[in-house]
Image (tube, rainbow, N blue to C red):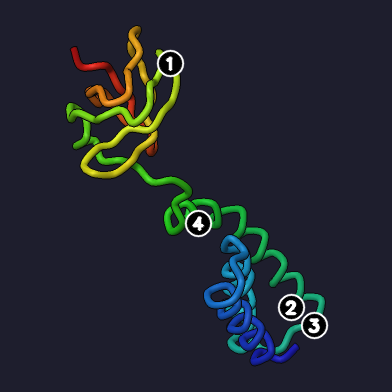
Amino acid sequence: MPFWGWIVVGAVLLAAELTLVDAQFYLVFVGVAALVTGAGVWLAGPFAPAVDWALFGGLCVVMLAAFRKRVYARIRRVDGEVSQGTVGELAIARATIAPGQHGRVELRGTLWDGRNVGDAEIREGERARVLATHGLVLELLRED
């Protein structure tokens, strides 16, 4: 394939990932591999088709294995984190939460998932202190 063919394929794959398809960043690295292959063919001269495809395949495998997971995790976080600034604040239970169980609580005017880490149940309307956060879950202890 001529060098410009690799560059066109790379550009199409990048554009598809970034605008049309959410392929979890696989197409980005395959597209970059195609662009690098095109640049290599352009700078080093034409290769046999088998060499082109071997270079492209090798670059795909190396880049996907080495970089995809880290880049994808950094760009597209799966779950958010609650700021640790919420620790120590009081939340209001919207339903009774038994010890060790999860339930809905209100904190700063927003509903959250909370887990009762104490020995006593937190009844609806009672206040509970936020002890820690794990992802979007608040760990709560009934305020006496």
Q: Residues within 10 Å of mark 2 (few under 14, many from 20)?
A: many
Q: Position of residue 122 (x, y in %)?
A: 32, 17
Tag 2 residue = 52
- Callout 4 environment at 10 Å: few (<14), some (14 to 19), or many (20+)? some
Earlier in the chain: of badge 2 and badge 1, it is 2
Q: Position of residue 29 (x, y in %)?
A: 59, 67
Q: Say which of 89 and 15 sits in front.
A: 89
Q: CA distance from mark 2 to mark 1?
A: 59 Å
Q: Secondary structure at mark 4?
A: helix
Looking at the rendering, which quadrant does residue 141 occupy? top left
73 with respect to 140 (left or right): right
Tag 2: amino acid: Asp
Amino acid at pointer 3: Ala
Position of 16 with respect to 122 (left or right) is: right
Among the two numbered marks 1 and 3 on one chain, the one whose residue lies closer to the N terminus:
3
Quadrant housing the C terminus: top left
Mark nearer the viewer, 2 or 4: 4
Q: Which residue is mark 1?
A: 100
Decide which of 74, 113 is in the foreground and name it: 113
Answer with mark 1 or mark 4, whichever residue precedes in sequence.
4
In this orientation, which residue lies closer to the viewer: 124 or 85? 124
Q: Nearer the viewer, mark 1 or mark 3?
A: 1
Left or right of residue 121: residue 52 = right
How packed is label 3: few (under 14 Cα within 10 Å), some, or many (20 or more)? few
